[in-house]
Amino acid sequence: MNIFLHGATRRLIIAQDKKLMDQREDYVRMQNNILANRIIHEGIDEFSISGDFSEDSDMISELQLIAGGLEGRIILLGSNFKVVSDTYERNIEQYIITEDTLKAMKGESVRAKRVGNSYVQVVTGIIDKERDQSKGVVITLASLQDGKGAIAYIKNHSVVINGLFFVISLILGSLLTIFSRRCFRDILKEMNVIAEGHQENRLSEEGFREFYQMAVSFNKITDRFKELENSRQEFVSNVSHELKTPITSMKILADSLLMQEDVPVEIYEEFMGDIVHEIDRENQIITDLLDLVRMDKASGDLNIAPANINDLLEQLLKRITPIAEKQGITIHLETMRQVTAEVDVGKLSLACNNIIENAVKYNNPGGHVNVYLNADHKFFYIRVRDDGVGIPEDCQERIFERFYRVDKARSRETGGTGLGLAISRKVVLLHKGSIRVHSKEGEGTTFIIRIPLNYIG
């Protein structure tokens, strides 16, 4: 602490000394400029010759007066660097040629210099700008003693000042400690309440910046936790509902058969066909759920290998085309170049298959599905466009959620589980890619997948 206070006092003395130096320099430079302007505007041409200036008693008296006010010395040089006036009357007729006087004679700015511990020297050129002529130089030495008293006072009373700093630091430190402990107690109390299960509570976002940032970060964590918890509960509810629906349908069909005697073979076969259909739907839901669970694991489960994306899409379209043709839908593949990328072929095929099948399922009879493949130096792009029913704007942000359906009735008819797009998005994200959707209701939908050519582990 003593070292800190001593350093603070030393910095105060240095700052005071610099301030004194700067103020004195500005004042002396102003006096030099006033003197130079008078010489120029009063037309004292003798000054430039250096012969008759000493006879100008008014100017000599003024120089003595200014020098006395500065407690220093003023020297005037002619245009030939000869001393034409010296308030100390020592260097008359001598020459002063230095780096500073050479600069000043050219009209250049010269920095002030400290002379010893008690004086500052300011050199200013006497430049007639209208005639572009240098008439001479003013050299002024001014005393710094006026401000030395303040510095000496600080040095002489450094013990008192150090003590004052110590008391102030102690008071501020104590207040800061008290306030910080109170803030910590309040935060800890609020966190304990949240930990007990009152997740609707939030930390108060106030106080010092550090406490504020900590509260904001903690509230973000709790908000994220709430979102995840709500998502989990919704997911469990949706899974229960989706799995229960086919079972309920099968139970109703089976009960209907059991309640009737001598059921005709035709009805029996129809009901059994419906039961098989519900079993298939249940199996598809379970399969999709298992796929999602597997992909929720680390991306290290991906089987990354170089693959020809053109061949991958062609194989997919061969499987989907017969389904599309039953509805009179035409599928067209357009590839701009051969694309080879590092991907998990199985998972990427599943993702693309889901999107292309959706383009067929939610299309209009006689519609079209266009699949487009292209690449640049870093990514490859798959675009799937249909001219089907489209997606309402308020639903487009939710279509990748698990079990979310835009048209629940049509999804039931087409056999959708509500998990296809969620699986596709997960696959794309595992490949460090992105998936976007553009759609207008009644005009069609376009999905755009972008994946790096080289897998980023």
Image (cartoon, rainbow, N blue to C red):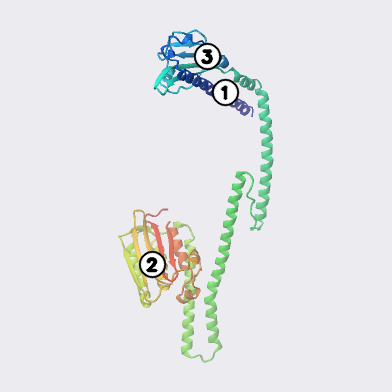
- Residue lying furthest bottom: 262
Q: From the top left corner, tell me how far across and down residue 194 is, in percent.
A: 65, 55
Q: Secondary structure at mark 3?
A: helix
Along the viewing direction, whichever of 39 and 70 lies nearer the viewer: 39
- Crowd tier of the residue under label 3, counting other residues whose Cα lies within 10 Å: few below 14, some 14–19, many 20 or above: many
Residue 234 seen in the current view: yes
- Label 3 vs label 1: CA separation? 24 Å
SS type, badge 1? helix
Q: Nearer the viewer, residue 337 or 78?
A: 78
The quadrant holding residue 451 is bottom left
Q: Residue at x 44, y 67 (%)?
A: 440
Number of marks in picture: 3
Left or right: 148 with respect to 439? right
The residue to which callout 2 is attached is 385
Circle 3 sits on which residue? 63
Q: Tell me the distance, in whole angstroms, between the alpha carbons under discs 1 and 2.
A: 77 Å
Q: Earlier in the sequence, mark 1 or mark 2?
A: 1
**x and y, in percent, of residue 413 in the image:** 46, 77
Q: Which residue does the image show at 56% across and 17% down from the upper left?
A: 70
Mark 3 vs mark 1: which is more N-terminal?
1
What residue occupies the far front of the structure in this picture?
42
Foreground label between 3 and 1: 3
Q: Nearer the viewer, residue 89 or 445?
A: 89
| Tag 2: amino acid | Arg
Give the amino acid at mark 1.
Answer: Leu
Left or right relative to 204: residue 328: left
| Position of residue 89 measured from the top left corner of the image (x, y, whole percent) | 50, 8
Residue annotated with mark 1: 20
Classify residue 191 as left or right of residue 398. right
